Image (cartoon, grey):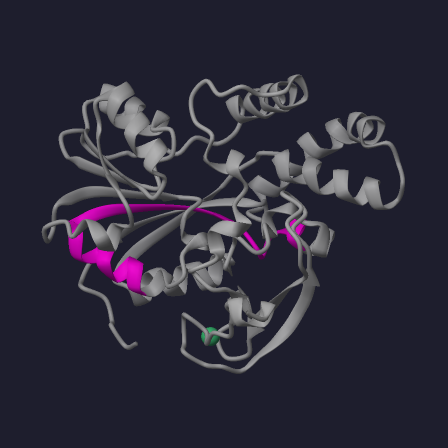
Amino acid sequence: MKAEDNFEQIKCNLCNSNESYILFKGKDMVHKKQGTFTVVKCKKCGLIYTNPRPKQSIISDYYPDEYWDIGETTKSSETKLKLFIHELINKFSYKLTIDTPIDGKILDIGCGDGKLLFKLKKEGWKTYGVEISELAAEYVQTKYGIEVFNGTVEEAHFEDETFDVVILNHVLEHLSDPTTTLNEINRIMAEGGILVVGIPNAGSFEAKFFKKYWTAWELPRHLYHFTPKTASYLLEKTGFEEQTIKFDNNPNIILSSFKYVFQDLRINPLIGLTLIFPFAVFTSFILSKTKRSYNMFLYSKKTNSGIVDQ
Ligand SMILES: [Zn+2]
C-alpha cells in the first residue's frame, strides 16, 4: 500500500467548503513521528485544519504508547522531572470550574485518568466518563468507582437529555468530525445544560509568534486548530449559546516551543529554557489577561437541537 493511501483530503467541517489555502507545513515536534503535515485555512469561514490528514484506520500509529500512560507507570528520571515541573506550573494555572448547582449528572468525554471526574464526584456530582483507551477506562472504574464507557460518545448511545454538564477538555481538536460529535452531545444534554470545551487557541499570540515551532499544533494528532471565532461559530452552529471564553495563563507551551527553537539554533535547551523561564511566565500571564494565550475554555449553554446541514 502506498503511503498516500493512508491519508485523506477533507472539506471544511464548519462550512463544507473545499476551498482553502496552505498556512504552513510542519512536523510532529512533540512525539517525533515521521512525516511532514500540511495545515490549511478555509477561504470561506477561516477554520484551520490538517489536510490531508491520516485516515482514522491508521491515526493510532501517530499516538505514542506513553500517550495513554495512566497511574503509576515506570518513568525515567528525566520524564519524572519534566512531569514535576509541569505539575508545579499547572498548580498556578487556570482551573476549569463549573458554577452551577451541584446535584446533576456530569459527563467527561475523554476522561483520561479520571482525576477531574473524581474531584467532581467528591463535590457531589453524579459522574460519568467516556474514554477510547480501554486501559484508562478500566483504571477509572476500578480506582474511583466511576462508570466509564469505553469507546466514542456516539457509540455510547446515551438517552436524550441525560446530562446537565458535558466536558470536552482537549478532545475536540482530535475528533475527525467535530460537528457531528457536538450535535450528538447536544442531543444527550438537558435543556439549559452547560458545555465546557477546553482547546488550544490557534489565534493566540504564541501560535503567530512561534509559527511551525508552536508545539500546540501537535501534528498530526490535532486535526483541527480552532480560534475563538471558529470555535464560537462551531458551537453556535450545533446549538450552544451564551458563550463565555476564559484564557489560561499556563507557560508550558511557550517553554516547549522555545525548546525546539533552541534545538534548531543549536543552543543548549536547558540553559536556554532556564534563562527564558521568567519571561515565559510573565508573557503567558499578560497574554491570558489580553485574551491571546494558548489555552482557552469555552462555556456555553444548550439552547436547541442545532442545525444539521451535513
Ligand atoms: Zn469553512
Taking depth in this image into account, of 88 and 35 the one nearest to the observer is 35
Q: Residue at x 59, y 26 (%)?
A: 86
| 38 lies above or below 131 | below
Horizontal side of 267 relative to 10 (left or right) equals: right
Is residue 250 on the magenta stretch? no
| Residue 23 image position (x, y, % from top left) | 66, 68
Is residue 189 on the magenta stretch? yes
Span colored in magenta: 180-207
Horizontal side of 47 relative to 269 (left or right) equals: left
Q: Extreme front residue here?
A: 1
Quadrant assignment for the C terminus: bottom left
| Residue 200 image position (x, y, % from top left) | 52, 48
Q: Extreme right residue here?
A: 266
| 195 lies above or below 73 | below
Q: Splitting the image into 4 quarters, where does residue 306 fall?
A: bottom left
Q: Does residue 302 appear in this view?
A: no
| Residue 256 image position (x, y, % from top left) | 69, 38
Taking depth in this image into account, of 100 and 276 the one nearest to the observer is 276
| 72 lies above or below 288 | above
Horizontal side of 140 relative to 187 (left or right) equals: right
